[in-house]
């Protein structure tokens, strides 16, 4: 169980750090997708910061479990919102992107709770 916890949480943190850096770089495809979803470009940095904070919180959770639990909860809520945003914009073909992150965040939250 401990090995699964470490692997899943590390994978979730790594994926979110990569995604956050991608948002900080503001690639054209990301800005176009956000525009299609009705999300202002001014939200790119704050949304990337939330992902980065969640990833760092997951890593800190190895030493301080309540921080990891809060970070995992925050990431689940973030990606529920992201998935809903894609549904609301009717971008159904792109739902797997936030849904994959939601799956990782949910697995991390479940393993945090079982820890």
Image (cartoon, rainbow, N blue to C red):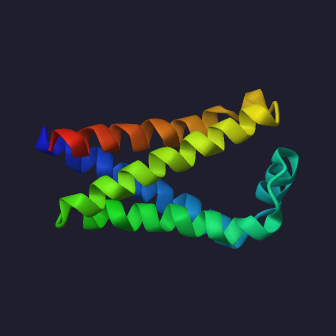
> At 64% from the left edge and 38% from the top edge, which residue is drawn?
83
Rendering coords of residue 77 (x, y %): 50, 46
Quadrant in the rendering for residue 86: top right
> Which residue occupies the foreground of this view, 54 or 97?
54
Rendering coords of residue 54 (x, y %): 43, 61
Rendering coords of residue 63 (x, y %): 17, 66
* Residue 56 versus residue 80 in the image, above or below: below
> At 26% from the left edge and 47% from the top edge, which residue is drawn?
7
Image quarter where the N terminus lies is top left
* Residue 108 versus residue 56 in the image, above or below: above
Quadrant in the rendering for residue 24: bottom right
> At 75% from the left edge and 27% from the top edge, which residue is drawn?
92
Tally of marks: 0
Q: Is residue 84 left or right of residue 35?
A: left
Quadrant in the rendering for residue 103: top left
Rendering coords of residue 87 (x, y %): 73, 31
> At 49% from the left edge and 67% from the top edge, which residue is drawn?
52
Image quarter where the C terminus lies is top left
């Amino acid at each position: 169980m401990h090995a699964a916890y470490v692997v899943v949480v590390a994978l979730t943190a790594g994926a979110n750090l990569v995604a956050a850096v991608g948002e900080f770089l503001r690639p054209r495809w990301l800005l176009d997708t956000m525009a299609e979803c009705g999300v202002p470009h001014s939200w790119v940095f704050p949304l990337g910061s939330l992902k980065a904070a969640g990833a760092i919180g997951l890593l800190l959770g190895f030493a301080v479990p309540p921080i990891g639990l809060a970070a995992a909860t925050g990431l689940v809520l973030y990606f529920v919102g992201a998935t809903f945003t894609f549904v609301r914009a009717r971008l159904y073909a792109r739902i797997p992107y936030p849904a994959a992150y939601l799956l990782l965040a949910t697995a991390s939250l479940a393993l945090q709770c079982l820890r």
